[in-house]
Amino acid sequence: MDRRNFLKTGGIALLGSLATGSAMALTTPGALGGEGADKKAAVALAMNHFGVSEADLKKVLAAALEKGGDYADLFFEHTISNSIRLMDGAVNNSYSNIDYGVGVRVLIGDQSGYAYVENITVEDMLKAARTAARIASANKGNKPLNLTEKELKKNYYTVASPWEEVSLKDKMPYLQKLNDRIFALDKRVHKVQASQSDTTSHIFFCNSEGVMFYDYRPMVTLGAVCIMEEDGKTENGYAARAYRRGFDFLSDEVVDVIAREAVDQTSLLFKAIKPKGGEMPVVMGAGGSGILLHEAIGHTFEADFNRKNVSIFADQLNKKVCNEHINVVDDGTIPFNRGSVNFDDEGAEGQKTYLIKDGVLTSYLHDRISAKHYGVEPTGNGRRESFRNMPIPRMRATYMEAGNVSESDIISSVKKGIFVDNFTNGQVQIGAGDFTFFVKSGYMIEDGKLTQPIKDINIIGNGPKALADITMVATNAKIDNGTWTCGKDGQSCPVTCGMPSALVSKLTVVERTRSKCLL
């Protein structure tokens, strides 16, 4: 089906073929990633899905290289997104969206040319290819190699129940249960907003080096905002879970977990105070505190910032940057994780990359361009928001590995400070690493014990310095599987973060101020 007919039918006919393809893929693994697959079945399905042949791909790649490009790639995407939201048990928002197109990239050294089309015909793809070629041009032509499917060695997000086969009627009971469960947990609950979204992306990629792959990427989010009233005061909390999973993710168990977390977080705020500000020790709680790693530290390890000498770590590779008991990882291989990738958006396999090993900065996060600059292999971090964007170095799941002390030992070592584990947003200056993060809730630490709950504060510091000031790391490493979304260069990308509890010897604590939300 061509683009015009696809739009005319609202995607119904094609979605029918997708359901058939998905069902087939379950018995012929490779498309959805089961074991023992016929590896050619996935790419054959993808080419049929997008209505292109190998001859078409070679023709477009040749056009992309006709102005002397060193390299070219094609990124095909078909994404189906659905979302529904309840307010106090009634639907107040629901939508579906279909995104469909192909991007063409041409590279000559560090020079890039990019163009995309939303109508996948050979004629339109050739126009895009020649546009990209003109942007990145040299004096000699080049020809692509033969195309060979890249084997999927391991699928990190196999799907048992594809979202294409799930109706709104199937999803509604879980949203209603989440709404009802939150109201039932506490009589102070005044309003509940429950939401569920799912996305299915069919990604087909090929390049002038002869690499082809197909990736079936699911995503699901279930969350709720809880608003409570007590003695004329109003507080709100939010809890959610997000994974690369199919319909099998929705269950009574996950509903109960999210409901309880939303109510507990909101209830705590009625008892919380705003502490006096100043410089003090801060214990970062396990899980969501990984936002500090992501924003204040992780971005400074992305290779484009270092290649351009923007990052403070540009000259620190293979040097000690923190205590030897600290290991920081960016990982694309965690099963069903929101930030995982079977392949990145340049064809590099998902992998686990140590950024810091035993306190030493061992690697940056690379896409194809930065890897060539540094003379290393790509780390699987070339990611893009959609076919409309070029890939750039992006994080996946960024976390600190477990240490060797207990959380209680860390807390007991603090005479006066704070414990924080619930962050909502922040702002960071990438180059210098200066940051401000808003802390939704936490606790005072007094004489080595957690005492009064606290709320609505900002912590201010410098990422590299805060990293160097981490003196204790607990054994309780945890990934926060919330709805983390990272913004960079105008592109959004799903990520996750995490860490064990850790002591930062000193950070500045101030009352809440307005801050720009980056994550």
Image (spheres, rainbow, N blue to C red):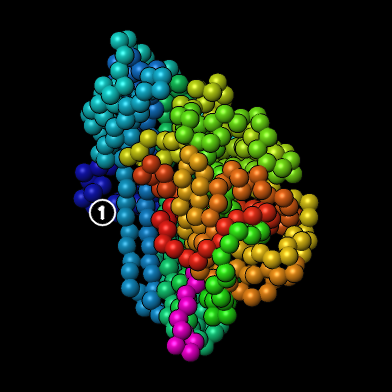
* Residue sitting at x 56%, y 26%: 377
- Reading the image, the residue beneath label 1 is 10
| Extreme residue toward the top, this view | 140
| Residue 452 shown left or right of residue 484 in the figure | right
Instruction: Examine the image and state in which quarter residue 506 appears.
Output: bottom right
Q: Residue at x 42, y 29 (%)?
A: 206
Residue 84 place in picture, x, y as percent: 38, 67
Q: In the image, 482: left or right of 94?
A: right
Q: Nearer the viewer, residue 59 or 355?
A: 355
Instruction: Please count the marks in the image.
Output: 1
Which element carries disc 1, helix, strand or loop?
A: loop
Comparing 142 with 107, the one in front is 107
Residue 136 appears left or right of 70:
left
Q: Position of residue 71 (x, y in %)?
A: 40, 21
Amino acid at dot 1: Gly
Residue 68 appears in the rendering:
yes
Quadrant including the N terminus: top left
Q: Residue at x 60, y 58 (%)?
A: 279
Is 308 within the magenta? no
- In this rendering, the answer to whether 404 lies above or below 146 is below
Q: Nearer the viewer, residue 167 or 366?
A: 366
Q: For the magenta stretch, what is the residue range?
A: 229-241
Q: Is residue 236 magenta?
A: yes
Picture coordinates of residue 164 (x, y %)? 41, 55
508 over 169 or under it: above or below:
above
Q: Height in image: 86 above or below 500? A: below
Which residue: 50% across, 51% down?
Answer: 435
Say if residue 495 shows up in the picture. Answer: no
